[in-house]
Structures are given as structure tokens and as C-alpha cells.
Image: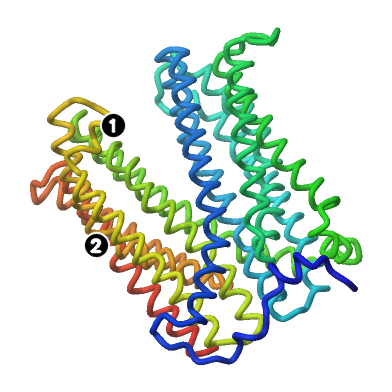
């Protein structure tokens, strides 16, 4: 069966670098791997930057509706974001499964994974919607101010309807990443961000003849964007020339309960990993609130700036996952080592840059958020700690990406729980409240927990590589 030349050249991995030992020096083979990893990672990074930007714009637009609406949105988004993060992590399961068969050139199996993976994602979309509906019913009993209850429930009701199309989009996105295409999802997500902002403007403020819906209008904008994301990828899957080969494989494939449950079995610990990381940072935010308002403000500034590093590392981790899964399918151990080393090298370069930015600009960067000298001084101290854990954070993210490429999820999820909930959070509490370091002490747990996590991931990586 003939395939489009672009798929053949840019997606199907070439054979010329197989079975070659991997020296640590930068040579021609490494330069090729750098180029391939960056070409996969940069679209993921751009898409993440777009999501962060539209999130900031969302907050600014909702803030114009007043304090009550802003508080209601903040509370609802806290509930919703953890559920959505789980769904996003859950969807990661499809990439290594497809990537392995892609490297093996077992293309018929890819069609089966697409069918079972999309259905498994749709199933999770329904399950998460049910979970959110239960949370919707429980909102009045969560101890929140009575003034925000109605708006929080109305806003969440709209967001619930966006979960299913979002999970369908994630299914197609991870299929595309499995075959080495990260650009299509990036383009769709950037257009969706535009639709989100326009939808917010029209329905929040009642423009162009639309009703003025306030906070509900922000939910309508989000729903429009996510419906567009799902429909756009479905249409492209059916119509895009580069996907025609895989569409034909999909049409020939049959549903398999074993494949369906394999996606679920791999996806749940991957989703749990993402949620545990996010929950750990959320718990630290709560602990900062036990100290004072200055600590909350400084913590929010430092967390916001830390996404500059995390966003890049996550993109490189995604690129590493794809490359490792392809080499795993080729049974190319040297290639796996090379792909992981390449992700590490690129991370080291960016890590050095971001450390210089945080240390050099620690007294200036907080001015982007506030003019309060006390907050700025505390935020600067937190940025010093943030600089300390950049390296171990980058290492654990790249290794997590490599382990995902092996479709290894359960043990890394256990390591994540140990690192954050057994070590990092208790250490933060002790530093802040027992040893007397206050708000900045909350941040002391991050480098300790991340160091443990990166060390455990390193041991796991070596163990799997040895068995491989």
C-alpha cells in the first residue's frame, strides 16, 4: 500500500542510524537526533505556551465581571483542572503503544490501536463527566461562600459538556504523536485558543447580538474551542493526505476488548502521575495560605515563572517519548540510549539558561506581577530555590518521557507518590512550620522530592534498559 512521500520521509523512521553504538560526544548521528527531537518537541512547547497564554487571557476577561464571578471561576477551575489533567495524562497511553508498532513497521496493528484508543478515550470522557457531575452536586457542601455557589455550579455545568470532545481530541492527538506528527495538534490548539477568546468576548459581554451570559459565557467559549478541536482532528483524520494511509488501516481494524483495556490499564497510572504532581503543588499552595497573604502572592509569582522551565522540559519529554517508542519497536537499544541522551543534552542547555534568568532576574521578574517590595523580596528568595531544583526537575521529566516510551507507568506512578507525598510535602511542612523558614520553606521540599524522583526514575530506566 503506497504512502504519501511526506509521511515516508518525515514520519517513518529511516534505517541508516540503526544498530550504531552511541558515543557521548556530539557527532553527526547526535545532530540528526537533536534535529528530530526538536522538531517533535517545539510544536508541543508552542501549544503549551498558547494554552498558558489563553488561560491568562481568560482570567483577565473573567476578572472584568467582578470579584464574585472571578472567585467562582477560580474555585470551579480548581475542581475541573485536576480532572482534566488526569484525562490528559490518561491519553498519553496511546503514544507509546502506537509508537512501538510504528517502529516495528506493524502498520495493521496501528489501525487497531487507533480504534481502541479513541474508544478508550471516549469512555474516559464519559467517566470523567460523571465524576464532575458528582462534584457539581457536592459544591454547596464544600464550605464555599454562598455568593459563589450558583455561578460555580452553572460554570461547571458548561465545562462538563466540554470533557467528552476534549478526550476525543486527546485520542487523535496522541495517535498523531505516536507516528511522529506533533504539528497538527499544535495548529488545532492555537486556532482553538483564538476561538476561545472570541467566544468569551461574544458571550460574556453580549456582543454581536449574542446574549450577555457573564461567567457562563466563558464556559460557552471553552466549549466552542473544545468542540472545534475534536471536530477539526476528526475531519483531518478523514481528509488529510498524510493520514490517508492510517485512515485505511483504521477502517480495516476491529474492536478488541484486550486492546481497549490495555489502553485503560496503561492510561490510569499515567493520569495518576500527572494529578499527583499537580496535587502536590496545590497542597503546597494551601500550606502557604496558612502563613500570610504575602506568602500567597510571592508563591503565585514564583509558580507562574517556574512554568517557563516546566513547559520546555515537558515538550522535550514528549519528544523523547516518541523517539524512544519508535526505537523500542525497532529493537534498537542504542537508539533508545541516544534518544534519551539527546533529550537530556537539550534539557541541560535550556536548564542552564533558565537558571541564569531566575538568578539574574530574581529581583526584577517579580515586578511583572506586583510593586509590593515585601512580596518581591520573598518571591526572589523562592526563585533562588526554584533555580536549585531546575536540573533535577528537568532530569525527572526527560526520564519520565523515556519510561513512557517503554509504556512503563505503574512503577513510575508509585515513585511519583513516594517522592511528592511521602518526602516532598512533609519536608515542606517541616521546613516552613517546624524549622521556622516560613513561606520560603514550603519551597524547600521541591528540590528534595524531585531529587528523589529523578534518582528513582534513573534506577528504573537502567533496570528496563538492562532487561531490554
Residue situated furthest front in the rendering: 28
State the CA–CA distance, disc 1 to disc 2.
29 Å
Query: Horizontal placement of 110 versus 440: left or right?
Result: right
Kindly indicate the quadrant of the structure image that contains residue 221: top right
Residue found 75% across the figure and 42% down from its top: 232
Query: Horizontal placement of 260 versus 375: left or right?
Result: right
Which residue is labeled 2 in the image? 448
- The percent coordinates of residue 160 (x first, y second) are 63, 33
Above or below, 301 against 181 in this view is: above
- The percent coordinates of residue 274 (x first, y second) are 48, 54
Residue found 52% across the figure and 63% down from its top: 38
* In the foreground, 103 or 428: 103
Secondary structure under the numbered disc 2 in the rendered image: helix
Disc 1 residue crowd, few under 14, some 14–19, many 20+, Cα 10 Å: few
Secondary structure under the numbered disc 1 in the rendered image: helix
Residue found 76% across the figure and 55% down from its top: 119
Which residue is labeled 1 in the image? 368
Above or below, 348 against 191 in this view is: below
Mark 1 or mark 2: which comes first in sequence? 1
* In the foreground, 237 or 129: 237
Kindly indicate the quadrant of the structure image that contains residue 133: top right
Amino acid at each position: 500500500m503506497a504512502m504519501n512521500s511526506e509521511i515516508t520521509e518525515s514520519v517513518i523512521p529511516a534505517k541508516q542510524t540503526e544498530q550504531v553504538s552511541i558515543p557521548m560526544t556530539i557527532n553527526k548521528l547526535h545532530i540528526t537526533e537533536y534535529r528530530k527531537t526538536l522538531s517533535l518537541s517545539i510544536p508541543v512547547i508552542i501549544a503549551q505556551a498558547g494554552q498558558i497564554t489563553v488561560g491568562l487571557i481568560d482570567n483577565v476577561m473573567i476578572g472584568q465581571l467582578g470579584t464574585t464571578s472571578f472567585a467562582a471561576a477560580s474555585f470551579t477551575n480548581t475542581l475541573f483542572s485536576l480532572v482534566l489533567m488526569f484525562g490528559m495524562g490518561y491519553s498519553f497511553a496511546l503514544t507509546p503503544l502506537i509508537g512501538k508498532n510504528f517502529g516495528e513497521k506493524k502498520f495493521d496493528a496501528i489501525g487497531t490501536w487507533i480504534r481502541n484508543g479513541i474508544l478508550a478515550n471516549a469512555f474516559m470522557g464519559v467517566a470523567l463527566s460523571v465524576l464532575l457531575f458528582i462534584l457539581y452536586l457536592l459544591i454547596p457542601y464544600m464550605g464555599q461562600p454562598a455568593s459563589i455557589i450558583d455561578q460555580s455550579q452553572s460554570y461547571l455545568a458548561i465545562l462538563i459538556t466540554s470533557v467528552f470532545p476534549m478526550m476525543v481530541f486527546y485520542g487523535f492527538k496522541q495517535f498523531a504523536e505516536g507516528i511522529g506528527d506533533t504539528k497538527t495538534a499544535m495548529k488545532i490548539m492555537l486556532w482553538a485558543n483564538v476561538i476561545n477568546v472570541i467566544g468569551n468576548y461574544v458571550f460574556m459581554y453580549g456582543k454581536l447580538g449574542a446574549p450577555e451570559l457573564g461567567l457562563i459565557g466563558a464556559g460557552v467559549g471553552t466549549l466552542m474551542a473544545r468542540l472545534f478541536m475534536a471536530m477539526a482532528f476528526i475531519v483531518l483524520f478523514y481528509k488529510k493526505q498524510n493520514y490517508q494511509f492510517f485512515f485505511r488501516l483504521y477502517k480495516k481494524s476491529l474492536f478488541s476488548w484486550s486492546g481497549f483495556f490495555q489502553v485503560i490499564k496503561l492510561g490510569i497510572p499515567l493520569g495518576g502521575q500527572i494529578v499527583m504532581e499537580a496535587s502536590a503543588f496545590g497542597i503546597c499552595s494551601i500550606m502557604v495560605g496558612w502563613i500570610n497573604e504575602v506568602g500567597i502572592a510571592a508563591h503565585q509569582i514564583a509558580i507562574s515563572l517556574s512554568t517557563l522551565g516546566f513547559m520546555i522540559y515537558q515538550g522535550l519529554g514528549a519528544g523523547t517519548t516518541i523517539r524512544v517508542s519508535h526505537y523500542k519497536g525497532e529493537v534498537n537499544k542504542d537508539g533508545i540510549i541516544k534518544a534519551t541522551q539527546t533529550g537530556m543534552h537539550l534539557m541541560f542547555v535550556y536548564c542552564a539558561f533558565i537558571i541564569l534568568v531566575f538568578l539574574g532576574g530574581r529581583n526584577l521578574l517579580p515586578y511583572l506581577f506586583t510593586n509590593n517590595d515585601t512580596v518581591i523580596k520573598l518571591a526572589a528568595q523562592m526563585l533562588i530555590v526554584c533555580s536549585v531544583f531546575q536540573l533535577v526537575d528537568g532530569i525527572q521529566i526527560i526520564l519520565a518521557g523515556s519510561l513512557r516510551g517503554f509504556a512503563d507507568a505503574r512503577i513510575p506512578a508509585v515513585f511519583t507518590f513516594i517522592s511528592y507525598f511521602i518526602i516532598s510535602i512533609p519536608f515542606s511542612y517541616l521546613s516552613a512550620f517546624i524549622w521556622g523558614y516560613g513561606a520560603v520553606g514550603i519551597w524547600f521540599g521541591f528540590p528534595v522530592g524531585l531529587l528523589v524522583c529523578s534518582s528513582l526514575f534513573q534506577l528504573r530506566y537502567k533496570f528496563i534498559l538492562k532487561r531490554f
